[in-house]
Image (tube, helix red, strand yellow):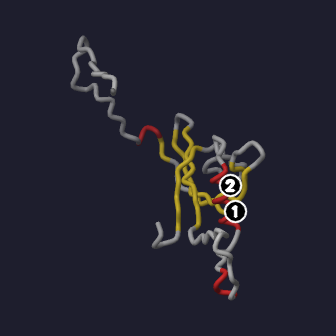
Amino acid sequence: NKKIGIELAVTSGTKAVGQANEHLKSKNSKGNATGEIIANNLQLSFDPDVLGLQVKPETPVTLYNNEFWYLVVHSDGDEVRFELSKPYSIGDDGHVDSWKERIFFEPIPMDDIPVDKGQEDMEDDEDIVVDVSRKI
């Protein structure tokens, strides 16, 4: 959101999600773009014009004005835990492995999550038909 200066993405995390005393890592490895975004979280925006510096036209200058956060989610079968976390670094394995800030939320018990399986109106002997066609 450019107005408030925050970018947000959703990712899954290890069982440490929502646990303040546990070492949280992203469940899946991240790519180079995430590394660049995390580097942005570690630095202040730099505007060469403020210092009166002349930048060569062929030199790309990227000005970052947004903080990047993850909504990190983990389900263990009994509950869904989630937190907003600001990534700090990526390990050699590509997983985000440290966080500048973690904001915890109360877990949601799986029993409290409505699940519509779409079968309440079906008869026991009724087949589910799915129309599949190839795109040409």
Q: Which mark is residue 39?
A: 1
Residue 43 picture quarter: bottom right
Residue 105 picture quarter: bottom right
Q: Mark 2: which amino acid?
A: Gly
- Residue 64, position as x, y percentages in the image: 60, 70
Residue 119 picture quarter: top left
Q: Residue furthest top?
A: 125
Identified at 29% across, 29% down, the residue is 118
Secondary structure at numbered mark 2: helix
Q: Are marks 1 and 2 in contact (CB under 8 Å)?
A: yes
Q: Which mark is residue 126?
A: none
Identified at 53% across, 66% down, the residue is 6
- Residue 22, position as x, y percentages in the image: 71, 49
- Residue 133, position as x, y percentages in the image: 30, 22
Q: CA distance from mark 1 to mark 2?
A: 6 Å
Q: Which residue is mark 2?
A: 35
Q: Mark 1: which amino acid?
A: Ala
